[in-house]
Amino acid sequence: MIYSKTKGNSNKYILFFHGNSQSHETWDAVINEELLDDFTLLTVDLPGHGKSFHSIRPEIDYTLKGMSVQIKELILSYQEFEYIIVANSIATNFIAEIAPGLLNCKGLFLTGACIIGGSFTTADVFQLNPNLAAAFAAYPADEELNLLLDDMAYQISDELKQKCKNTFLNTDPLFRTTLNESITAEDWSDEIENLENMDIPIAIVYGKNEKINHFHYLNRSNIKKWENETLLIPDAGHCIQLDQPKLLAAMINDFAQYCFK
């Protein structure tokens, strides 16, 4: 079972999907902003994460395509409503995999996007950062995990960093290793083309202090971007929701108002 938490009672939904080895709680500071009180906010624990199930068939469920199928089932249960999707990091891949089948979706808000396809390779997507290896290790050494978390966010408190660390360690380790195998095998759809063919607003947003992905590579795609450009948030890294939740909430609100008008 995929766990989700709901806040609000509007008929206009915003669905939030977190990145690798995070949980629905990564969005807490964002969804608690009053600016978003006009919407119903749904935060999700991906399979293998948080309070969601740990798979007994990880080789199927924890691949790029396998995760996407499960997420699609959840999203389609809300298709009677108008909704937008907010996704961070690897969740942007999962959403891009299934984008053509997202019925009644009014917009995609992608942060720290690492979508891939066509002529784009992993070298186009990811920076040469040795600390990223810990994100795909079953049991990274403590120091390796600390360095990864330092690069995932730009400026978070020691308390929040420890919470992120605990969440990482609570994630099914087979998720990380199986996902890595899936990526290494290039077992993905043309996610770029999927988004290029979408006729809905798509926001592409990065932190200016991003240390995981290249944040201008999607400018070479034909994705029809909201505001016609890749948007950068100051004093924020890969996980903008941790560094700049107030600014991110304001941007999501502007985007949602645009999509739902």
Image (tube, rainbow, N blue to C red):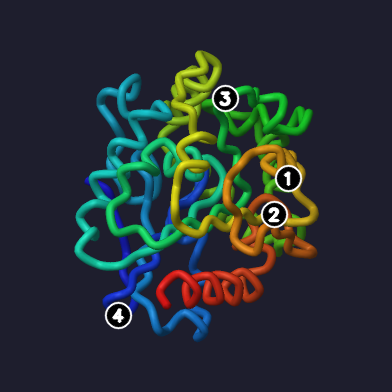
Q: CA distance from mark 1 to mark 3?
A: 18 Å
Question: Does the residue at mark 4 contact the one at mark 1 (Cβ under 8 Å)?
Answer: no
How crowded pointer 4 is (Cα within 10 Å; few <14, some 14-19, many 20+) is rated as few
Q: Amino acid at mark 2?
A: Thr
The residue labelled by disc 1 is 215
- Please say if the residues under marks 2 and 1 sit with CB atoms less than 8 Å apart: yes
Q: Secondary structure at mark 3?
A: loop
Q: How far is disc 2 from disc 4 in space, using C-alphas? A: 29 Å
Quarter-wise, where is residue 96 in the image? top left
Distance between mark 2 and mark 3 Cα atoms: 19 Å
Residue pointed to by mark 3: 118
Residue count near mark 2 (Cα–Cα under 10 Å), binned few <14, some 14–19, many ≥20: some
Rendered image: mark on residue 203 = none
Q: Which residue is mark 4?
A: 10
Residue beneath the point at 32% across and 64% down: 5
- Amino acid type, residue under disc 3 in the picture: Gly
Of the two numbered discs 4 and 1 on the same chain, state the one appearing first in sequence. Answer: 4
